[in-house]
């Protein structure tokens, strides 16, 4: 996997974690799962991908003149899906905060 793809996945995961900490502080509820994907499901998916990488190998190909592997594509998809889950939660949180905000007189 390309270093940039791996770093994008790690950064997206950390931003999701920071969002959970902020939600817990602001709303007083600890909800770690994002939709149907919780931390246990994420670990199972990562275990399966590592097992796949061990048994099959990188499966390289060229995309836009750059050598990538299937794991790069999966990593980009994972980082984008984590960003989408974050945006969904951020929008929901902003709506909740707008409802909770007292009316100005």
Image (spheres, rainbow, N blue to C red):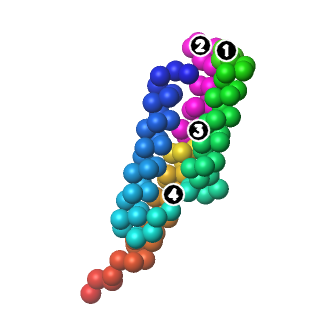
The C terminus lies in quadrant: bottom left
Q: Secondary structure at mark 3?
A: helix
Residue named by callout 3: 78
Q: Which residue is mark 4?
A: 32
Outermost residue, right direction? 56
The residues colored magenta run: 61-80
Tell me the number on the disc at residue 61. Answer: 1
Give the image quarter of residue 97.
Answer: bottom left
The label number, if any, that marks residue 67 in the structure image: 2
Residue 44, quarter of picture: top right
Q: Is residue 69 magenta?
A: yes
Looking at marks 3 and 1 on the same chain, the residue that comes earlier in the sequence is marked by 1
- In terms of depth relative to the viewer, which is nearer, 3 or 98? 3
Look at the numbered disc 1 and give the secondary structure of its residue. strand
- Which is more N-terminal, label 1 or label 2? 1
Asked if the residue at tag 1 contacts the one at tag 4, i.e. Cβ–Cβ closer than 8 Å, the answer is no
Alpha-carbon neighbours of circle 3 within 10 Å: few (<14), some, or many (≥20)?
some
Tell me which label, 3 or 2, sits earlier in the chain. Answer: 2
Q: Is residue 37 above or below residue 68?
A: below
Q: Residue at x 39, y 78 (%)?
A: 100
| Disc 2/disc 1 C-alpha distance (Å) | 6 Å
The mark lying in front, picked from 4 and 2, is 4
Say whether disc 4 or disc 3 marks the residue closer to the N-terminus.
Answer: 4
Q: Are marks 2 and 1 in contact (CB under 8 Å)?
A: yes
Give the Cα separation between the discs numbered 3 and 1: 19 Å
Q: Is residue 41 above or below residue 4?
A: below
């Amino acid at each position: 996997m390309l270093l940039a793809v791996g770093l994008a996945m790690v950064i997206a995961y950390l931003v999701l974690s920071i969002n959970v900490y902020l939600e817990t502080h602001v709303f007083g509820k600890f909800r770690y799962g994002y939709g149907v994907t919780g931390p246990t499901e994420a670990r199972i998916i990562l275990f399966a991908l590592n097992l796949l990488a061990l048994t099959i190998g990188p499966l390289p190909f060229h995309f836009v003149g750059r050598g990538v592997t299937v794991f790069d594509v999966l990593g980009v998809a994972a980082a984008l899906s984590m960003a989408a889950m974050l945006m969904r939660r951020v929008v929901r949180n902003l709506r909740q905060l707008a409802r909770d905000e007292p009316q100005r007189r």
